[in-house]
Amino acid sequence: MSSSTTTRTLSTAVAHNLTAGMYFTVSGFTGAPGTATYGGRFSGTFVVASAPTSTSLTYTAEESVTITTENVTGTPTLVRRADLDFLESTRPVNIRTFASSGTTRTIVTQDPHLIPTSTAITATVSIVHSTSELTRYFNGTHTLTATGSNTFTYTGVYQDPTNTVNRDPSITIAATTPTGTATVTREIVITGLVGSTGFTYLMPPSNYTINSEVATGRVSATSIAATNRQLLSRTIGEITTGAINHGLLVGDRFRLSNLSGNNQDVFNGSYQVTSVPSSTVVRFTATPSSKALANKALSGSTAARINTSVPHPSWSSRRARS
């Protein structure tokens, strides 16, 4: 075995019968001089980058390290993973560490996520940690960009499940290991349209080509970006989806999440469509919410002022009850 930056090379005692694009799992060895560090930098599940000979192959790993050719120790095995040839688009990948610098979040996965570098995907991050406050800066559905075979970055927001706290999403957190289940689960993202009834979408790399076949199933739109939001009245909200057809009908239910900035807690939540002015505009009933009072004061014999602990909707000439 040897390594040059992130490219690993393995030599097998017998023919491995693998070709570029196939998946395999390597485990069970440490490598001279017998330290676990060596094995940890070679073990895992990967995709074959090249097979120069019948007994050698290369693949790309997460960590950049240079190791000269060494004989392996332990009981090394290399197993072909045919079960991964048809990966589910929504396959969850376990998270090894999570970190943040400003609003830039970094996720390192246990195994390669198999998304091409520089490719952006929509995925749901779900982290369990003993300090639940940390997870509010990471969890949710976001647009992640693959920056390596095991790494993603994305712009994070602060999400409070009770919608009573609105904090600056900028935070610095060193690489932290989850204390519970932590996964990245990708959503299907449409990459192109085929007429009025077809579309293409990104899947994990596969070594197979499948011709058109008849299939039975259901398609629903997910993760459409909202480009504008506003309150038309105290109880009517409106969302614009830019140039993307939201595909919603009156009575459909939808969820708004990951909205940031002022009044984010006013809009985030689940709603039912009340009207569809256009294919990119949808209206819904916004339920008035209560805000905790931070302080109150009298500014005259007939005027009172109250400050809320979180931003309230920017309404004027509206009635409120305290």
Image (cartoon, rainbow, N blue to C red):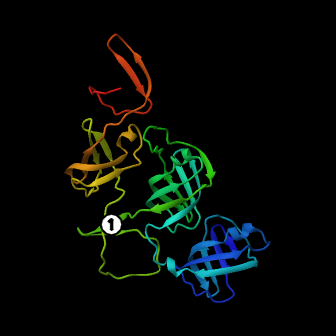
Image quadrant containing the C terminus: top left
Q: Residue furthest top?
A: 301
The amino acid type of the residue labelled 1 equals Gly
Q: Is residue 72 visible?
A: no
The local crowd at label 1, few if under 14, some if 14 to 19, many if 20 or more residues have their Cα within 10 Å, is: few
Residue at horizontal 79%, vertical 72%?
A: 34
Query: Which quarter of the image is occupied by the N terminus?
Result: bottom right
Q: What's the residue at 48%, 38% (across, down)?
A: 167
Residue 198 left/right relative to 89? left
Q: Nearer the viewer, residue 6 or 217?
A: 217
Residue 102 coordinates in the image, percent (x, y): 54, 44
In the image, farthest residue toward the right: 33
Quadrant of the image occupied by residue 229:
top left
Which element is circle 1 on?
Answer: strand
Give the labeled residue for mark 1.
192
Front-lying residue, 244 or 176: 176
Residue at the far front in the pictured view = 322
